[in-house]
Amino acid sequence: MKVRLVDVAHARSGDKGDTANVGVIALRPEWYDLLARELTRERVAAHFRGVIDGGVDRFELPNLRALNFLLHGALDGGGTLSLKTDAQGKVFSTALLRMTLDVPDDEARRLGLPAAPAR
């Protein structure tokens, strides 16, 4: 089953110099393990390929049902130096929430995940 990240999590992002900071929080406690499994450093880096120049760090915060990502080299030097439209990295959360996850049908049913709308 295809599941949109925006339907199972919410996110916030901002800047830390030249690094965008993106927090992703499961909307339901039972969905956190799915997010922890699916949102790997590699997958997030691939999602932002061509947008960020550096690596991706991931931190798990299971007590908050959240993951935090640092996207290095995302802001062309940061707020006062960058000529990017989003020099503070506020849209990175929305961009990440556009990701679609492929979840086995039986797991999706067991977790009560909402299916992505058919295109």
Image (spheres, helix red, strand yellow):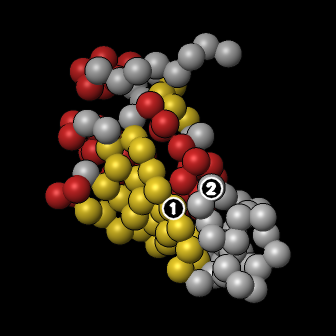
For the residue pair 37 and 81, the one nearer the viewer reads as 81
Q: Please report whichever mark, 1 or 2, sits nearer to the chain's N-terminal start.
A: 1
Q: Which residue is mark 2?
A: 91
Q: Is residue 41 visible?
A: no
On residue 34, the disc is: none
Q: Secondary structure at mark 2?
A: loop
Q: Amino acid at mark 1?
A: Ser
Find out whether the residues at labels 1 and 2 contact each other: C-beta distance under 8 Å.
yes
User: Who's the residue at 71% across and 60% down the image?
Assistant: 49
User: Who's the residue at 35% across and 49% down the image?
Assistant: 25
Say left or right for 40 vs 75: left
* Residue at the front extreme of this rendering: 80
Q: Which image quarter holds the C terminus?
A: top right
How many dots with numbers? 2
On residue 13, the disc is: 1
Relative to 50, residue 39 above or below: above
* Residue at the right extreme of this rendering: 83
Q: Amino acid at mark 2?
A: Val
User: Who's the residue at 21% across and 40% down the image?
Assistant: 29
For the residue pair 104 and 11, the one nearer the viewer reads as 11
Image coordinates of residue 56 in percent, x first then y, are 53, 70
Q: Secondary structure at mark 1?
A: strand
